[in-house]
């Protein structure tokens, strides 16, 4: 560890240098994927063998980790992202985009593989189909995050687009240090080990992922409320299931809440889940209680659907606040 005036320089396992001013003690650390998204709006999704024409395509920064970091920083939380990009134009673009919004990016390492890339189709109702090629994200390792920043006041926010074992190891270290842990188990590829469920504070999934995860865990039920209850019970955690235009269901071992969504004209729902996770983490980090954090995240996720592209439409704190009175508070069920 090197000290210099007010700065604290930390060298992590892969050689990246973190530079945190000592005053930064409240921080969201996102461990996750950085991609560039190639977005093609379509009239409808193609059938197998069909060729469809898209009038235009756009490229935007994406990746669940990167999107969630952007959502958190715009919602007003000091945020760092740790992951890997390739030594290429997509990687530089991803980093610069986050830097321009003050996300701490010095924990991003460089891999020999190309930067991750996602091909995203959007139909006329704003629904999407996504194929991700992970590339450099596959080389992200948990030792890129030094123990020194896994502090009690901080939050570790993870998804499942970087190697799961690395994510699980990071969560174990974070929990040992008392860091708040939030997992967005997206995309669903493997069951979540029991010890990970037990150390998680929050598990966030969408309705489709809830059913996929319940199947992998061999739950006997497939109703969303019972799935959430089962995860909450097994992990003594809070399970939040996002339901798209139906709102959000949130269950802790003791309480159950439902909250309706913000009424918006959906252009593109890509990244709405990421927005929810980033803003929820930011609200907790900023000291809001659970139901207020839920409400802020629901409002933000709605706002993020109003334009094309995931990361570009993450709302700022003021926009979230301006829209808070457009939805009701979460209700107990
Ligand atoms: O959640 C949306 C994200 O998933 C996109 O930005 C894309 O990169 C994929 O990772």
Image: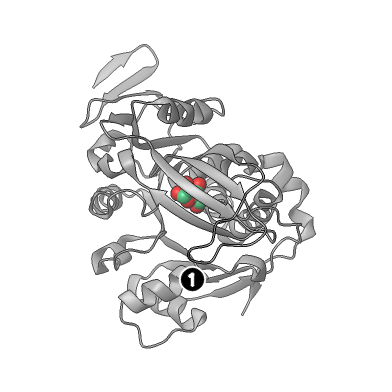
Please tell me which residue is depicted at 29% across the width and 51% down the height of the picture. 167
Colour mode of the rendering: one colour
Q: Which residue is mark 1?
A: 208
Say whether residue 175 is left or right of residue 28: left
Q: Nearer the viewer, residue 241 or 123?
A: 123
x%, y% of residue 24? 44, 29
Rendered position, 239 above or below 148 = below
Outermost residue, bottom side: 220
x%, y% of residue 103? 49, 31
Check disc 1: other Cα within 10 Å, few if <14, some if 14-19, many if 20+. few
Q: Nearer the viewer, residue 138 or 278?
A: 138
Please tell me which residue is depicted at 51% across the width and 43% down the height of the picture. 67
x%, y% of residue 141? 25, 41
Q: Is mark 1 within 8 Å of ligand 1?
A: no
Quarter holding the N terminus is top left
x%, y% of residue 130? 49, 55
Rendered position, 181 above or below 229 = above
The number of discs equals 1
Say whether residue 228 is left or right of residue 8: right
Please tell me which residue is depicted at 32% across the width and 63% down the height of the picture. 189
Res. 73 image quadrant: top right
Q: Is residue 139 visible?
A: yes
Quarter holding the C terminus is bottom right
Rendered position, 9 above or below 281 = above
Please tell me which residue is depicted at 25% across the width and 51% down the height of the picture. 176
Say whether residue 291 is left or right of residue 189: right
Q: Nearer the viewer, residue 305 or 232?
A: 305
Q: Is residue 76 visible?
A: no
SS assignment at label 1: helix
Outermost residue, top side: 5
């Amino acid at each position: 560890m090197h000290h210099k005036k007010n700065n604290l320089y930390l060298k992590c396992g892969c050689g990246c240098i973190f530079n945190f001013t000592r005053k930064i003690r409240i921080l969201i650390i996102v461990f996750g994927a950085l991609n560039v998204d190639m977005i093609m709006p379509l009239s409808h999704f193609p059938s197998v063998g069909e060729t469809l024409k898209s009038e235009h395509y756009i490229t935007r920064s994406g990746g669940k980790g990167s999107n969630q970091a952007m959502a958190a920083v715009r919602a007003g939380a000091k945020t760092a992202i740790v992951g890997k990009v390739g030594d290429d134009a997509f990687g530089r673009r991803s980093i610069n985009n986050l830097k321009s919004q003050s996300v701490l990016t010095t924990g991003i390492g460089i891999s020999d593989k190309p930067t991750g890339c996602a091909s995203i189709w959007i139909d006329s109702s704003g629904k999407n189909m996504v194929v991700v090629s992970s590339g450099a994200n596959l080389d992200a390792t948990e030792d890129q995050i030094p123990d020194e920043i896994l502090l009690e006041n901080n939050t570790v926010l993870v998804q499942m687009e970087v190697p799961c074992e690395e994510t699980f190891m990071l969560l174990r270290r974070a929990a040992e240090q008392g860091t708040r842990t939030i997992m967005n188990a997206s995309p669903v590829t493997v069951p979540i080990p029991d010890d990970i469920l037990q150390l998680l504070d929050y598990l966030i999934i969408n309705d489709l992922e809830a059913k996929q995860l319940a199947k992998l865990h061999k739950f006997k039920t497939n109703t969303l409320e019972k799935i959430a209850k089962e995860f909450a019970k097994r992990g003594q955690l809070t399970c939040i299931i996002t339901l798209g235009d139906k709102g959000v269901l949130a269950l802790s071992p003791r309480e159950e809440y439902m909250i309706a969504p913000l009424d918006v004209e959906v252009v593109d729902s890509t990244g709405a889940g990421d927005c929810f996770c980033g803003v929820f983490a930011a609200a907790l980090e900023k000291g809001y209680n659970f139901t207020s954090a839920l409400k802020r995240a629901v409002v933000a996720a709605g706002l993020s659907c109003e334009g094309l592209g995931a990361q570009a439409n993450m709302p700022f704190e003021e926009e979230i606040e301006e829209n808070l009175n457009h939805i009701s508070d979460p209700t107990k069920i």
